[in-house]
């Protein structure tokens, strides 16, 4: 069975980005790229990525010309966006409608859900989210783009420290009240 994992950095008060989609709060933190919660290590098990349009546009705007992923990426959008290369597929509608294509693209590896939080919740409601891995930064924003747009029970599986981050891996149990 293909495993779906939502792996992201987050503020202590549960935001992925501020109201203007800035990640300035994130880039000032110290982090050992080879330490606990290493994205490099995580990527060795990833066969495909999924993300929402805002996240894709953030990468296009802030990291132009440097698409970091060789694996197929499914970008959920209602609009016609320009693909940065042939690995990008634009899709829309419920995640379940794309399950077969995403899992075929991932092959024998897992799927990285990059965000945002409402799309991640749609994946969880569709039974397409097995784990949430977070690097929690010691900062609060008060408002912004939320980590997860729904009510779910999770189970803490692992925790550690990396630089300024508390890293934690949770299993998704199901809708709140499942446990
Ligand atoms: N902290 C981190 O490490 C981290 C990680 C990931 C993301 N981020 C940041 O967090 C923010 C997330 O933005 P966001 O909350 O707006 O979430 P998002 O999921 O990146 O984008 C949301 C947009 O995706 C499209 N979409 C979502 N579900 C869809 C569906 N089922 N069908 C078709 N289109 C769909 C819609 O755009 P349209 O209707 O306009 O097409 C929607 O407005 C971004 O700023 C991103 O850069 C941070």
Image: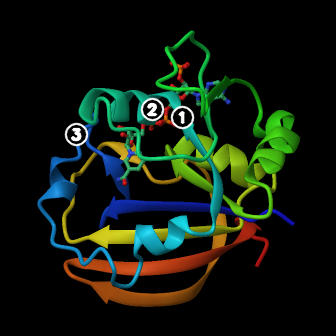
Dot 2 beta carbon under 8 Å from ligand 1: yes
The residue at which mark 2 appears reads as 56
Q: Are marks 3 and 1 in contact (CB under 8 Å)?
A: no
Q: Which image quadrant is residue 129 in?
A: bottom right
Q: Quadrant of the N terminus?
A: bottom right
Percent position (x, y) of residue 14? 37, 59
Spot occupied by residue 131 in the image (x, y as percentages of width and height) = 64, 69
Q: Residue 20, can we see it?
A: no
Disc 1 beta carbon < 8 A from ligand 1?
A: yes
Q: CA distance from mark 2 to mark 1?
A: 6 Å
Name, please, the residue furthest toward the left.
Answer: 28
Tell whether circle 3 marks a residue whose Cβ is less than 8 angstroms from ligand 1.
yes
Residue designated by label 1: 52
Dot 1: element: strand
- Horizontal side of residue 42 vs 29, given as left or right: right
Tag 2 near tag 3, CB within 8 Å? no
In the image shown, does 103 or 168 lie closer to the viewer?
103
The nearer-to-camera label among 2 and 3 is 2
Residue that badge 3 annotates:
22
Q: Earlier in the sequence, mark 3 or mark 1?
A: 3
Q: Residues within 10 Å of mark 3 (few under 14, many from 20)?
A: some
Question: Dot 3 lies on which element?
Answer: loop
* Crowdedness near tag 2: few (<14), some (14–19) or many (≥20) residues, C-alpha within 10 Å: many
Q: Are marks 2 and 1 in contact (CB under 8 Å)?
A: yes
Q: Quadrant of residue 163?
A: bottom left
Who comes first in sequence, dot 2 or dot 3? 3
Q: Residue 74 vs residue 109: left or right?
A: left
């Amino acid at each position: 069975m293909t495993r779906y994992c939502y792996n992201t950095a987050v503020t202590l008060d549960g935001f992925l980005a501020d109201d203007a989609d800035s990640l300035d709060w994130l880039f000032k933190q110290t982090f050992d790229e080879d330490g606990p919660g290493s994205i490099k290590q995580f990527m060795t098990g990833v066969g495909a990525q999924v993300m929402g349009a805002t996240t894709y546009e953030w990468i296009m705007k802030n990291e132009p010309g440097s698409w970091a992923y060789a694996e197929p990426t499914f970008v959920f959008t209602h609009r016609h966006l320009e693909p940065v290369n042939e690995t990008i597929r634009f899709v829309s509608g419920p995640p379940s409608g794309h399950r077969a294509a995403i899992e075929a693209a991932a092959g024998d590896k897992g799927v990285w859900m990059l965000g945002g939080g409402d799309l991640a919740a749609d994946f969880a409601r569709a039974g397409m989210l097995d784990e949430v891995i977070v690097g929690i930064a010691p900062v609060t924003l008060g408002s912004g783009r939320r980590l997860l747009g729904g009510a779910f029970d999770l189970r803490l599986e692992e925790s550690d420290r990396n630089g300024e981050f508390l890293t934690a891996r949770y299993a998704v149990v199901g809708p709140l009240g499942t446990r």
